[in-house]
Image (cartoon, coloured by chain):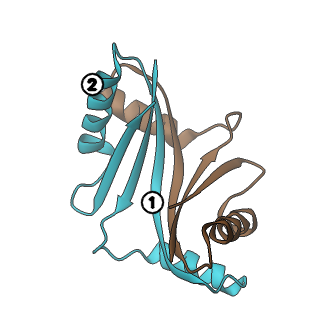
Chain colours: A cyan, B brown
Amino acid sequence: MFEAEVKITLKKTVADPQGLTIKHALESLGFTSLEQVRMGKFITIQIKAKDKAQAQAEVEAMCAKLLANPIIEDYTVEVK
Amino acid sequence: MFEAEVKITLKKTVADPQGLTIKHALESLGFTSLEQVRMGKFITIQIKAKDKAQAQAEVEAMCAKLLANPIIEDYTVEVK
């Protein structure tokens, strides 16, 4: 069995109101050195596969079909 | 300026209905080799700091004070 870590982030050109809200909240707590905060998703997937390459390919297919929105999001898959 | 990547995950003992819903959705799309899917958050923070260690310490303080709920969540901070 393999464990894949998927990071899904908004593309740089897409506005991120949630990240902005977190930035303001952190600033109001005294963290004043912030330049930018961006919010994304982190999904861990345990999958049965015959090898690492197959696990990687399957999880990338999951991202393309369901997990990420390719119009506004980027994703990276790392199989351990 | 430093960029920190924060991964926030539910502790292993905490139920994750969102991850379960994603698992079922993936299975209905034909991905039948899944063992487990867990949903977390991925936050990228750009911060001004005099060195990497200071950036790491500040972002860890942000996690402890606001970003993560230590009762149900674990977090890791990686400064690049």
Towards the viewer: B37 or B78: B78
Image quarter of residue A30: bottom right
**Residue drawn 59% across and 39% down?**
B16
- On the image, the x and y values in percent for residue A55 come to 34, 25
With B12 as the anchor, is A1 left or right in this view? left
Q: Are marks 2 and 1 in contact (CB under 8 Å)?
A: no
**Could you tell me which secondary element the residue under label 1 belongs to?**
strand
Farthest residue to the left: give it. A71
How many marks are shown on the rendered structure? 2
**Residue drawn 28% across and 29% down?**
A58
Image height of A27 relative to B78, above or below: below
Q: Amino acid at mark 1?
A: Gly
Image height of B12 relative to A33, above or below: above
Chain letter of the residue beneath label 2 in the structure image: B
Q: Amino acid at mark 2?
A: Gly
Task: Give the Cα separation between the discs numbered 2 and 1.
Answer: 26 Å
**Residue drawn 61% across and 67% down?**
B52
Numbered tag placed on residue A40 in the rendering? 1
Farthest residue to the front: give it. B51
- On the image, the x and y values in percent for residue A59 come to 32, 33
Chain letter of the residue beneath label 1 in the structure image: A
Image height of A70 relative to A79, above or below: below
**Could you tell me which secondary element the residue under label 2 belongs to?**
loop
- On the image, the x and y values in percent for residue B3 come to 50, 68
